[in-house]
Image: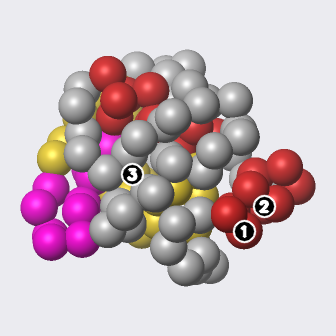
Amino acid sequence: MAQVTFSDANGHQSVLDVPSGTSIMEAAVDNGIDGIDGQCGGRLICATCHVFLEAVEGPAPPGLDADEDDMLDYTAVQRRPNSRLSCRLVMGEGPGALIVGLPDTQT
């Protein structure tokens, strides 16, 4: 299980323990984290789960693939070098920690 810290645009932080095999988007939506909509349910067609991957401790999450890279061009806020779609950030085995920044809007 890994720990994910969500930091919103106002600096408010929420921390969740996320089991392996669970995406950050699923964990956020299931736990009512404001700032991640996940309108498509993780099918990589909406870009409403955009986050900024700020820090990683432990195993690195899967890398950016071509489909995610293309979809990041359609986010509601300006894409950054550390932009990711949280539906594609699936927690691996073992401990670790991530800090993700949330954009001020997803739509």
Q: Amino acid at mark 1?
A: Asp
> Is 10 in the magenta?
yes
Q: Is residue 13 above or below residue 43?
A: below
C-alpha separation, residue under disc 3 versus residue under disc 2: 20 Å
Residue under label 1, please give it. Answer: 73
Is disc 2 placed on a helix, strand or loop? helix
Among the two numbered marks 3 and 2 on one chain, the one whose residue lies closer to the N terminus: 2
Residue at 22% across, 31% down: 32
| Most foreground residue, 62 or 27 | 27
Check contact, mark 2 vs mark 1: CB within 8 A: yes
Residue under label 2, please give it. Answer: 69
**Residue 78, percent across and down?**
55, 79
**Residue 3, percent across and down?**
30, 39
Mark 2: few/some/many CA within 10 Å (<14, 14-19, 20+): few
C-alpha separation, residue under disc 3 versus residue under disc 1: 23 Å
Q: Amino acid at mark 2?
A: Asp
Residue sticking out furthest to the front: 107
Residue at 15% across, 70% down: 11
Residue under label 3, please give it. Answer: 98
